[in-house]
Amino acid sequence: MLVIILLTAILLGFGMYEFAMHRRRVLAIPIRIHVNGTRGKSSVTRLIASGLRAGGIRTLAKVTGTLPRIIDEKGMEVPITRIHMVNIIEQIKVFRYFAKKHPQAIVMECMAVQPEYQWICEHQFVRATVGVITNARMDHVREMGPHLDNIAMSLSNTIPSNAKVFSAENRPRLMHFMYERAEESGSDFVVTVPSEINDDCMRRFSYIEHPSNVSLALRVCEEFGIDRETALDGMVKAYPDPGALYVHRVTLGNKQVMFLNALAANDPESTFMAWQRARELYPLSGKRILLLNTRGDRFDRSVQLVEMIGLHMKDDFDLLFSMGESTEMLTAHIRRSGIDPQKVVRLGQVKPEKAWDAIWESVEERAFVFALGNAGHGGLAVTHLFRSRRS
């Protein structure tokens, strides 16, 4: 019994020491920016970090998007290897790495989904000097709640104390939740305006970026005295997230396909925005094909996407390929959503090469393929095929 008590005391003592050391590492970094939100967290984290670096601020960043990465002071990427399940304790290890680099600023993407863990990530681990909330959209409803109000309140758990908070969320009711939480925390709440970013600015990016993300990142950089042109130059030159909206042009014989990877935008609102953005920037000539990749453990998300297609896009595409897990269960939802069953091809769980072949067999001369749904379980692999064989 005495041995158990001694071991418990030692473990508690070690935990207290480690946490005290973590606090010292955190406070040694003058600028700490914590990025949360439903969509665009990884992109905004990268944009802010690259803008700060362009302005001469020694900046490190951590993203947890499509692939977890640490981005060093030169903009180079260091993969994060996870032996076990994702755990927010990872943030302590990341700060230990940061401390060796002595940065002036860090930009951290929030890695938590559950409301209580979001609070812990901010108030125990990061203790941000600037908070960022990209937006609130209908996603992770099991963890954060079934309504946008619940999601806005959950995301507000990362609003720091006595700091400044920037957000691109412009819906009055959701802004109200965030503003109230900021006021309770003694923080100022600032909403950015994407309309100030024109198409000429957006065409400088090698991929499809959202004006709201760029506007938000520029405003944060301005807070630290970096002029917009300097920050924007840095953002344009930075590596995008692997899940960024890239268009890959591929030619096989007399056939040509434009492939847009929108798998990272896997909630209905963000996906539809990506579709609209693509239509604005690119002539969607030829056959229009949707490639919906599903995950069995995210079936509710697949249903939401099908409903969105039926509501906003059912007359705007020629074919819908469904691949991945539980595609047979989507049949009834597709029918109820008013989508023409004649337009639907169910591939199921197939190898990426099979999906590739099916797409090309359906193309006569030209086609635009819009990949949506989930990156896992084959989605990202199909994207890699088009990327590796682009013209």
Image: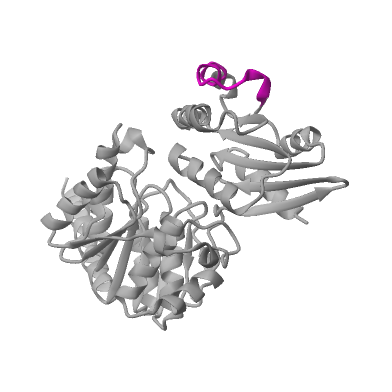
Percent from the top left, x then y, of residue 62? Answer: 42, 63
Q: Residue at x 56, y 65 (%)?
A: 205
Q: Residue at x 24, y 46 (%)?
A: 172
From the viewer's perspective, is 43 left or right of 155? right
In the rendered view, would you say 253 is above or below 91? Answer: above
| On-image quarter of the N terminus | top left
From the viewer's perspective, is 54 left or right of 345? left
Percent from the top left, x then y, of residue 226? Answer: 37, 79
Q: Residue at x 53, y 70 (%)?
A: 236
Percent from the top left, x then y, of residue 38? Answer: 38, 47
How is this picture coloured? one colour
In the rendered view, would you say 83 is above or below 225? Answer: above
Percent from the top left, x then y, of residue 250? Answer: 76, 51
**Residue 208 can be seen, yes or no:** yes
**Residue 63 can be seen, yes or no:** no
Of 324 and 390, the residue lying toward us: 390
| On-image quarter of the C terminus | bottom right
From the viewer's perspective, is 109 left or right of 21? right
Q: Residue at x 48, y 31 (%)?
A: 308
Residue 204 included in the magenta stretch of the image? no
Residues shaded magenta: 331-346
Residue 334 included in the magenta stretch of the image? yes
Q: Seen from this angle, which residue lies furthest right? A: 253
In the rendered view, would you say 286 is above or below 10? Answer: above
